[in-house]
Image (spheres, rainbow, N blue to C red):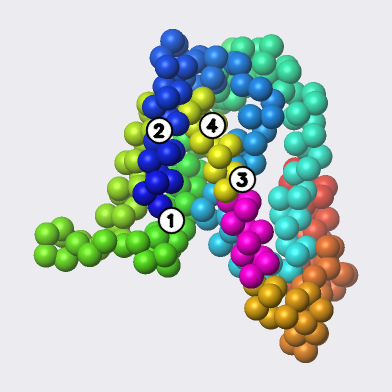
Amino acid sequence: MGSYLALTFGVGLWLSRRSRGSVVDFFVGGRALPWWLAGTSMAATTFSVDTPLYVSALISRRGIAGNWEWWSFGLSHLLLIYLFARMWRRAEVVTDVELTELRYGGRPAAVLRATRAFLFAVPINCISIGFVMLAMRKVVEALGLLPDLSGWMPGDERLWAVVALSIFVLAYAGIAGLWGVVATDFFQFFLALLGAILVAAFALAEIGGVAELKLRLAAAGRSDILQMTPPPGSESLPFGTFLAYLGIQW
């Protein structure tokens, strides 16, 4: 774990020179990120420490079909990649809320931009970061990495572990800018993907393979958990909710 954190910080320091030129260099990588690196970084962002815990709970509760909660965004992502991305690049904005003012104009658009910026920056970000920090604490605790601070540090050691990791992330993101974050995302994505594949392989081996998994689910009355789309009448994922994901949410 120490080597992993040191490597992450080293990459941030090495790439910090790319972010020193201007605000554009720091926040949008000088608009020079290759598409494959930007795309991998976006995928890594949705592969955060809280995601495996959330997805495991979701599939346990709603089955594989529960993943339509985000699979429904496939169409909008295609539109973003092939239609809107080049328009955003042409607009030369730094943040997405700037598009609001460009699109509508005038004082009402400025108020709308400020309101949206506040909503995303404060309540939504606080909730999202809270999810991540809770998951980070659970993972650190499960790995047995919590230090024994009794006697020389007040409070709960779980809180101090989260504070230490948060300061670390803030430091390397603040030094490296977008280039450093994207580069570490690229490395972290493949590391996390390898870990997920290994966990799946060990889990299947533990219960005797896919055939045994199907038998156990059938015995428990949960055969529908493996279906890619929810059957009509499903209690775990109502068909109306499924249609709302496909027709509205994206």
- The CA distance from mark 3 to mark 2 is 18 Å
Question: Element under label 4?
Answer: helix
- On screen, residue 43 versus residue 242, left or right, reads left
Q: Residues within 10 Å of mark 3 (few under 14, many from 20)?
A: few
- The CA distance from mark 4 to mark 1 is 21 Å
Per the rendered image, the range of residues in magenta is: 192-202
Q: Name the residue tied to disc 4.
A: 183
Which amino acid lies under the numbered mark 3 shown in the image of this protein? Phe
Q: Is residue 246 visible?
A: yes
Q: Earlier in the sequence, mark 2 or mark 1?
A: 2
Dominant SS type (magenta): helix
Which amino acid lies under the numbered mark 2 shown in the image of this protein? Gly
Question: Element under label 1?
Answer: helix
Q: Residue at x 57, y 48 (%)?
A: 191
Q: Residues within 10 Å of mark 2 (few under 14, many from 20)?
A: some
Rendered-image quadrant of the C terminus: top right
Q: Earlier in the sequence, mark 4 or mark 1?
A: 1
The nearer-to-camera label among 2 and 1 is 2
Q: Residues within 10 Å of mark 1 (few under 14, many from 20)?
A: many
- The CA distance from mark 1 to mark 3 is 19 Å
- The CA distance from mark 4 to mark 3 is 12 Å
Which amino acid lies under the numbered mark 4 shown in the image of this protein? Ala
Asked if labels 4 and 2 touch by Cβ distance under 8 angstroms, the answer is no
Which amino acid lies under the numbered mark 1 shown in the image of this protein? Met
Q: Earlier in the sequence, mark 1 or mark 3?
A: 1
**Residue 170 x/y as whole percent:** 37, 36
